[in-house]
Image (cartoon, helix red, strand yellow):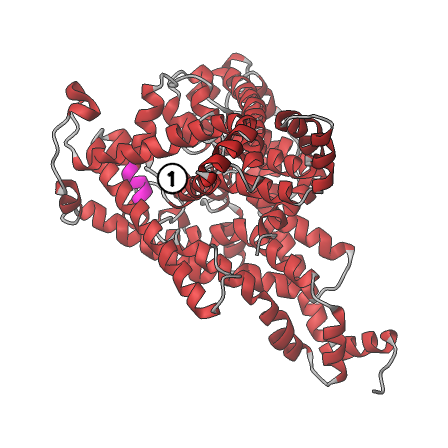
Amino acid sequence: MKREGRFWRDLKEHKMLLLMFLPGLLYFIIFHYLPMYGTVLAFKDFRISEGIWGSPWVGFRHFEYAFDDLGFINALRNTLIISLLKLVLGFPAPIIFAILLNEIGRSTFKKFVQTVSYLPHFISWVVLGGVFISFLSLNGPLNLILEMFGFAPRIFMSEENGFVAILILTDIWKGFGWGAIIYIAALAGLDPSMYEAAVIDGANRWHRIRYITLPSLVPVMTILIILSMSGILDAGFDQIFNMYNSRVVDVSEIIDTYVYKKGLVDADYSYATAIGLFKSIVALVMIVISNKIANTIRGKEADALW
Amino acid sequence: MRYGKGKEIKALKRSAGGIWFDSINYLFMLFIVVITLYPFANQVSISLSTTAGAYSDKILLIPNPISLDTYKVAFHYDAIWSGFNNSLFRMGLGTLISVVFTALTAYPLVKKRLPFRKTFIMMILFTMLFNGGLIPNFFLVKELGFLDTIWALVIPGMISGFNVYIMAAFFRNLPESLEESAKIDGAGYFRIFTRIVFPLSLPVIAVIALWVAVGHWNEWFASLIYTQDPHKYVLQVVLRRIIIENNTQDITTIARQIGKTQAFTTRQMQATVIMISTVPMLIIYPFVQKYFAKGVMLGAVKG
């Protein structure tokens, strides 16, 4: 009875706060939990005449079909290739940049470089898609530069291998500066006396980077690795949707673009929902697993997400 | 130790690291600046050059000779104007409701004795880990009658769990004594929120407002799938049609109307619309960039 009494007292005392929370609560229910419930579409055979609720159940048929669907298999493979390459090549880029920038010391030049470096983060892929299509075109600067060195001009955006390389390089180009902010801040918080002590002990620059700078970045790196694991099936919809074309679609069709085509272009709603659900579940499983791993490795809660 | 004074240590640090490393590092940083800015500089020059200039100059960096023809055509292109207005309106409304409702959602969660607090937090956390995907969201927006309205663009993404989390972290660090004294004076939670918490939280609110605003300015997919009426396209979708889908018939028509036929190529026209959409961002960027960077740190405070 006493506990219940306290609950009612808390409720009464916080009724204004609950009222303030109400719009947010409704928002999350309607715009997040309702679509989650809407994934039942993946287990139905959607017919417009019967609506979402009236359409018949088909169990796991759409999922079984997906793994016989060469289009989906190809999209899954492309997604994994592109996102893994982006992770492996893109993850070290901001770290290397932050470490090298840290060696510049405090100066206006350092600030300027950093400010410039994260400018592309604020430009949409619609615009950047246009910029790179122009930049890499037959009349674009890259071909003109290559020509000066005696290479034959190439249509980079139409070559399958070249296109995947373009996706990865432009993704790194757009994101390294922004990604470096958090590392640069971690380095700025380091006690300069540690470097001074290391110098006195005879450490050269490489030693200082290896034994002071790099280890101080490990906690941040752990968190960022965990976060990036859940995006293993995110190969970058915005980027690819605005850059790909029919000549390179075989190597750049990813799960997200495939869901868009199947769902909103072909109106195969149930199947597209099933593929989307597959992706969401993989993301969920990945983040739970990687968080567990992080907890075990570190042996403490501090660096894990929750 | 022999090196007791800071000055000597500094000198040693220089020599120990070697002038070579420093020089190469500076050059590398300069190279990074160049590869980041050059693609934009190239677009500026293409948009401002005559066709002959744009194609004769090998690595176009400075317009040669200057021609404003493409800008004149863009100026007469209604779709760019309506897109610009739609984007501005969307950004204003979207940012306003996002900030207000994010703050209203975050504040109660800071109160330890709020009933169902844990449940609410878990509920919001889960939305950051799992989502229903494109198709259920599309049906929801459609069923709500949001198609071809501004609501389709500003409501579905109104509150993000991440922003709630950042704001709550900030609220938690506000001095409790201020709230306590207001409570003694008989102020309710809503009054405390509007009179004390919100004004004191302007730094975090500014950061989130900027993030959301840039997000709205750059967002195109919602407008692409939820808007059918071309007059309601946001600027990014208008751009997409010109830049990515190569849809330049309207522009050719306008060019003919104002007597600029054959004066420029599609690529130049595309460079022009790229600049029109990017210049507002480039102008405000130097002034607001430090707030963006600050926001990243707010998110990292937790660890």
| Image point (61%, 68%), residue name | A216
Predominant secondary structure, magenta span: helix
Determine which quarter of the picture holds residue B175.
top right
Protein chain holding label 1 = A
| B244 versus A224 height, above or below | above
**Residue B82 image position (x, y, % from top left):** 53, 17
In-image side of B44 versus B251 (left or right): right
B129 to B247, vertically: above or below:
below
Residue at 76 percent of width and 73 percent of height: A193
Across and down, in percent, residue A105 comes to 75, 64
Identify the image quadrant of the N terminus of chain A: top left
Q: Is residue B238 visible to the viewer in this orientation of the structure?
A: no
Name the residue type under label 1: Phe
- SS at mark 1 in the image: helix
On screen, residue A209 above or below A28: below
Q: Residue furthest top?
A: B257
Q: Would you call the spot at circle 1 few (<14 residues within 10 Å), some (14-19), or many (20 or more)?
A: many
Tell me which corner region of the image, top left, top right, bottom left or bottom right, holds residue A148.
bottom right
Pick the front one: A260 or B5? B5
Image mark count: 1
Q: Position of residue A181 (x, y in %)?
A: 62, 54
The residues colored magenta run: A254-259
Toward the viewer: B127 or A51? Answer: B127
In this picture, residue A260 sits left or right of residue B19? left
Residue B261 in view of the camera:
yes
* Residue lying at 48% horizontally and 68% vertically, measured from the top left: A298
Task: Look at mark 1 in the image and give the residue it sits on.
Answer: A241
Q: Is residue A81 magenta?
A: no
Residue A219: x %, y % from top left: 55, 64
The residue at 69%/34% (across/down) is B202
